[in-house]
Image (tube, grey):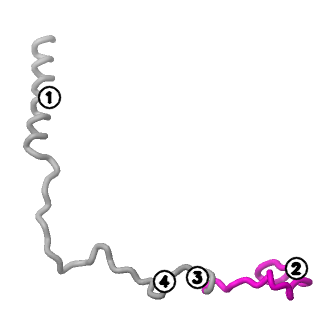
């Protein structure tokens, strides 16, 4: 059993022991043109301003919660 697939030498003529090469095996389910377009092309496109994820409503809500905690601490020491 010196070959790469470990086949018993007595069964080399058996048609069930025919294995594809690595190229044939991996090319079997690929399309003819396996190149895919870039999902994020580099450079040259229009740029959008980066927006901060916090809105004024969120900032106001956080400020009210902090104020409520500080008033609670001040009233009930």
Q: Nearer the viewer, mark 4 or mark 1?
A: 4
Q: Is residue 34 left or right of residue 37?
A: right
Which residue occupies the extreme right position in the image?
Answer: 10
* Quadrant holding the N terminus: bottom right
Magenta stretch prevailing secondary structure? loop
Residue 74 sits in quarter? top left
Disc 3 to disc 2, C-alpha distance: 27 Å
Depth check, front residue: 49 or 37: 37
Q: Which residue is drawn at 18% across and 80% down?
A: 44
Residue at 13%, 57% (x, y): give it.
51
Tell me how far mark 3 sits from mark 1, CA to CA.
61 Å
The range drawn in magenta is 1-23
Q: Which of 36 and 41 is in front in this view?
A: 36
| Residue 12 position within the rendered picture, expressed as x and y whole percent measured from the top left | 86, 86
Among the two numbered marks 3 and 1 on one chain, the one whose residue lies closer to the N terminus: 3
Q: Is mark 4 on a helix, strand or loop?
A: loop
- Checking the image for residue 31, the label placed there is 4
Badge number at residue 21: none
The numbered dot on residue 8 is 2
User: Mark 1: few, some, or many residues within 10 Å (few <14, many ≥20)?
Assistant: few
Which label number is shown at residue 28? 3
The residue mark sitting in front, 4 or 2, is 4
Q: Is residue 41 above or below residue 74?
A: below
Of callouts 3 and 2, which one flags the residue occurring earlier in the amino acid sequence? 2
Residue underneath mark 1: 65
**Which quarter of the rendered picture does the C terminus lie within?**
top left
Q: Where is residue 22 in the image (x, y as percent from the top left)?
A: 64, 83
């Amino acid at each position: 059993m010196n070959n790469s697939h470990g086949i018993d030498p007595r069964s080399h003529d058996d048609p069930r022991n025919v294995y594809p090469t690595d190229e044939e095996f991996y090319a079997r389910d690929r399309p003819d043109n396996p190149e895919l377009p870039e999902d994020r092309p580099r450079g040259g496109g229009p740029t959008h301003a980066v927006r901060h994820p916090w809105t004024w409503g969120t900032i106001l809500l956080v400020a009210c919660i902090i104020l409520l905690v500080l008033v609670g601490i001040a009233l009930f020491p």
